[in-house]
Image (cartoon, rainbow, N blue to C red):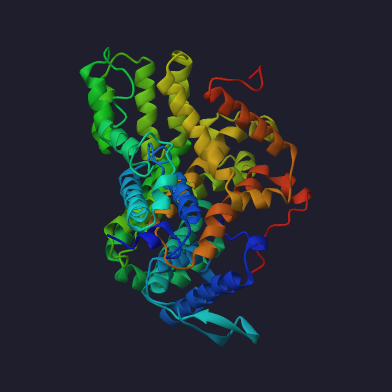
Amino acid sequence: MFGYVEPDKPELKIREFELFRGYYCSLCKTLGRSYGQISRLSLNYDLTFLAVLLDSVNEEATHGKVERCIAHPVRKRYTVTSNRFVEYAADMNIILTYYNLKDKWSDEKNVLGALGSAALRRAFKKAAGRNREKTERIEGLLGEVDRLEKEKCASIDEAAEPFACIMREVFRCPHVCDEKKRKVLGWLGYNIGKWIYILDAWDDLEDDAKSGSYNAILEQFRYDGGNIDEFKAGIRERIDFSLTYSLSECEKAYALLGAVKNTGIIDNIIYSGLIVKTDKVLQGRCSKNEGSVQGFGG
Amino acid sequence: MKDPYKVLGVKPGASYDEIKKAYRELVKKYHPDRYRDNPLADLAEEKMREINEAYEYLMKNAGNYQYQSESYDNSGSSQSGSYGAQYQSRQSGQYQTQYEYQDESDLERQVRAYINSGNLNEAQRILDRMRNRNAVWYYLQGLIFVRRGWYDRGYTNIQRAVNMDPTNYEFRNTLNNLNNQSYGYRSNPYYTNVTQREYDMCQICGTLWCADSLCECMGGDLIRCC
C-alpha cells in the first residue's frame, strides 16, 4: 500500500535531491539505532516525505554530515542529523509496516508477511509504547478497514475513509506545538491517505478482477467480469477527479502550513511528484510503452 | 503585527511593482473562493487578513505617495485597492446572502449554517430527517460530502442537483468550482513544465474541455456540442 509518494526527480535540483536523500539516510540510520538492523529494510519514501514535511515547520536549522553506511560502503553520503521529527517518522514507519505485514499474512497468507511481522514484533512493541495513543487509534481504524472489506463496501469514499483517517493520525505529529499547524498537517495527511487508497485500488484492478479479491472500485462501479480495459476507460475520468481533487486539497493545506525550510523538495512532491505518479498509474500499462522518463532510482 | 515585507515575501525597499505583484500572487493563492468547502477556510481567512494588513500598511506607511496614487483598485474597495472590503462583506454574509432563499424551509437554512460552521454531523442529521429530496437536498448533501473529503459522492450529488435544476446558478457555480479546483491544481507552473515533456492528445482535449467550461462559466461557449 505504500511507496506512491515520490519526488519528480527530473525536476529536482541536485541540492534538493541530496537533502531528500539526507533525510532518507537519517531515517534509515535512526531505524537501525532504535529498532535493530532488520527494521531498516522497511523504510519507504512515504515516510521520508513525512520526515521532510514535519521538519519543514521546525525552525531549528538542519544539521548534517557526510558519513559512510552499510548500504553504500564505497561512497560517503550526506546524512541529516536525526531529531524528534525524524524519530517520530521512524516510529510511524515501524508501526505502519508492522500492521501492513501482519495484514498480508492474515489476508493473503503471504509468507513474507508472517516472517516480516515476526521480525518486527519487538520493534513494533517499542514504537507502540512510545506512541501509545496514536497506535490505539490506528489499530481501531485498521479494524474499520477490515470490516468494510468484509462487507464488500461499494463506495470508494467510504472504503477509503479509515485509511485516510490513519494518515491523518500519522501526519498530526504531537511534536508540532502549534495546534493550527497540526490541523493543517492532519488535513494534508487525510487527503494523501485518500489519494493513496484510491490510487492503490486502481493499481490493483486487474489483479483483483482476476482473483476475485475485494476492490472498492470494482464494487462501486459493478464490474461484471467483462473486458477490464473497457471498464477502466469508462471510469477513468471519475477516478481521476477524486485523485486530483484530493491532491488539490493537499496543496491548499500545504499553502497554509507556513513551511520555513525544505520547501524545494516539498514543492516538487506536492506540485509535481504526486500528479506525475497519478498520471502514471492512471494510464496503467500505456505509460511503460511510452518510455516514461519519470522514476526514482534512489 | 508581523513584518509586512516578510508576509508579502518581498525584500525591504522593494519597488511598487514588486509589492503589487507579490500581493496579487498571494491573493490568488489564499483567495476565499479557493478555500470554499474546505475545513481550513478559517485559516485561509486569517492568512488573507494578514496579507491585506501588510499590503495596506506598506501602501500607507512606506512614505511613498506614489504607492497610493497608483494602487491597484479592482475590487471596489477604496483602501489602497486591497481585497479587504469585498472580502469582509463576503465573510459576514457567509455565502448566505449572496443567493435568495426566501422559499427555503428553516431546516435547509439550519443545514447551511451547520455546514458553514463546520459541524457536519449535525448538518447530516438534519438532512437525513428531511423528506423532500429535491435539488436543494442533493446540493446540500453534496456540500457535506465535499467538506468531509468524500469527493466522489460530493461531486455526484451536486451533479444530480444541477441535472434536476439546471437553471440554478448556485449549483452550477459550485460544480464548476469543483472542476476548476482540480484543473487549477493540474495547471500549476511546476507541473506544466513536466507536461511539456510528454504532450499528448489527452492534454489537448483536457485543455479544450476546460476552456469550454470556463467560457460557459462566463456565459459564453467555445464548443457548441458540449
Residue at x-position 59% and y-position 74% = A18
The residue nearer to you, when weighing B169 against A68, is B169
Reply above or below: B165 against A92: above
Q: Quadrant of residue A240?
A: top right
User: Is residue A294 depicted above or below B151 in this figure?
Assistant: below
Location of the C terminus of chain B by quadrant is: top right
Residue A98: tell me if it is visible: yes
Q: Taking the image as drawn, is residue A3 in sight? A: no
Q: Position of residue A5 (x, y in %)?
A: 54, 57
Percent x, y for residue A211? Answer: 61, 42
Residue at 46%, 61% in the rendered image: B14
Q: If the image is split into quadrants, where does the N terminus of chain B sit? A: bottom left
Left or right position of A74 against B25 = right
Q: In the rendering, at what x and y percent does residue A174 appear?
A: 30, 64
Q: Quadrant of residue B13?
A: bottom left
Would you say A263 lies left or right of B62 here?
A: right
Give B51 or B126, whichever is nearer the viewer: B51
- Number of numbered discs on residues: 0
In terms of depth relative to the viewer, which is nearer, A18 or B29? B29
Is residue A58 placed above or below B37 in the rendered structure?
Answer: below
**Which quarter of the figure has residue A225?**
top right
Where does residue A297 sit, x and y in percent of width and height?
A: 67, 67
Residue positioned 36% across, 39% down in the render: B148
